[in-house]
Amino acid sequence: MKLWVKVFPKSREDKVIVKDNIIEVRVKEPADKNKANIAVVKLLKKHFGADVRLVSGATSRRKLVEVMY
């Protein structure tokens, strides 16, 4: 299953928020040196309990991720 997520790096806490069919992922890591992307994948793996990979949007706040059950 592929999902679009909106990422907020340098947040106060790590969490996944679903509202109005939009998935927001807030991570503490900065967008520097791929740190935020790695944190997003780890957080979504924990949230969905499945493997997750980043499909596109490595340098964007809006990312396409694939959840593999």
Image (cartoon, grey):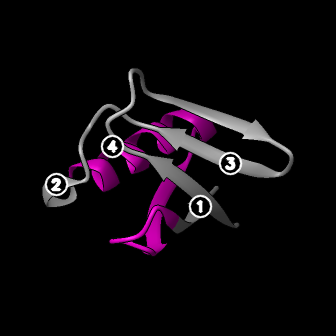
Residues shaded magenta: 35-62
**Where 69 sits versus 48, above or below?**
below
At a point 62% along the width and 40% down the height, the residue shown is 48
Task: Mark 1 vs mark 2: give the one in front.
Answer: 2
Mark 4 crowdedness (10 Å alpha carbons): few <14, some 14-19, many ≥20: many
Task: Mark 4 vs mark 1: give the one in front.
Answer: 4
Seen as rendered, the residue at the extreme bottom is 56
**Where 2 sits versus 12, above or below?**
below
Residue nearest the observer in this picture, 36 or 68: 36
Quarter where residue 24 is shown: top right
> Can residue 60 be found in the magenta stretch?
yes
Instruction: Check contact, mark 3 vs mark 1: CB within 8 A.
Output: no
Mark 4 or mark 1: which comes first in sequence? 4
Q: Which residue is under mark 4?
A: 39
Q: Which residue is under mark 3?
A: 23
Q: Which residue is under mark 2?
A: 32
Q: Which mark is residue 68?
A: 1
The amino acid pointed to by label 1 is Met
In the displayed structure, does residue 69 sit left or right of residue 32? right
Which quarter shows the C terminus?
A: bottom right
The amino acid pointed to by label 4 is Ala
Residue 25 location, x and y as percent? Answer: 53, 42
In the displayed structure, does residue 4 sit left or right of residue 14? right
Which quarter shows the N terminus?
A: bottom right
Quarter where residue 29 is shown: top left
